[in-house]
Amino acid sequence: MKNLGVNYGLVFTAWGAGGVFGPLLGGMVRDVTGTYGVAFAVSAVLSTLGIIITMIIKAPDKALAAKKVHLPAGLLNCPHCGEGISLQASTQKH
């Protein structure tokens, strides 16, 4: 839910661009080839590619993403909570 606004904006921007350029490109293909068949075939291939990519890509693992955070020198990530822990001698337990 935290990226809903950004995702919504990207989806509808792409939808708008497709609405503007799709018919223009389809018309140009029709003028060159004499048929809309090629334009429909290209659209079908791109739609299928989008479906396949959607099925393959998964959300990033939060635990893995937390481990990739680069901390300043002298700090380590706690394996339990991901919080930065100082390497300096400390009497506090984490």
Image (tube, rainbow, N blue to C red):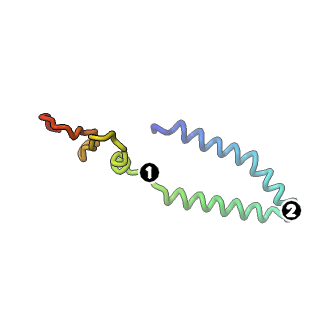
Instruction: Give whichever of discs 1 and 2 has the lower sequence position.
Output: 2
Could you tell me which residue is drawn at 14 percent across and 37 percent down? 93
Question: Residue 84: horizontal and vertical position, in percent?
Answer: 28, 39
Q: Which residue is mark 1?
A: 59
Q: How far is mark 1 from mark 2, CA to CA?
A: 42 Å
Dot label at residue 32: 2
Left or right? Give the position of 4 relative to 37: left
Rendered-image quadrant of the C terminus: top left
Question: Residue 47: horizontal and vertical position, in percent?
Answer: 64, 58
Element assignment for label 2: helix
Instruction: Give the camera-side residue of 93 and 88.
Output: 88
Res 53 → quadrant: bottom right
Q: Amino acid at mark 1?
A: Ala
Question: Residue 54: horizontal and vertical position, in percent?
Answer: 53, 56
Instruction: Give the camera-side residue of 14 and 93.
Output: 93
Does residue 13 sit above or below 53 in this rendering? above
Could you tell me which residue is drawn at 49 percent across and 39 percent down? 3
Res 77 → quadrant: top left
Left or right? Give the position of 25 relative to 6: right
Element assignment for label 1: loop
Left or right? Give the position of 72 relative to 41: left
Q: Amino acid at mark 2?
A: Val
Q: Residues within 10 Å of mark 2 (few under 14, many from 20)?
A: few
Q: How many marks?
A: 2
Left or right? Give the position of 91 relative to 72: left
Dot label at residue 39: none
Res 17 → quadrant: top right
Does residue 61 sit above or below 44 in this rendering? above
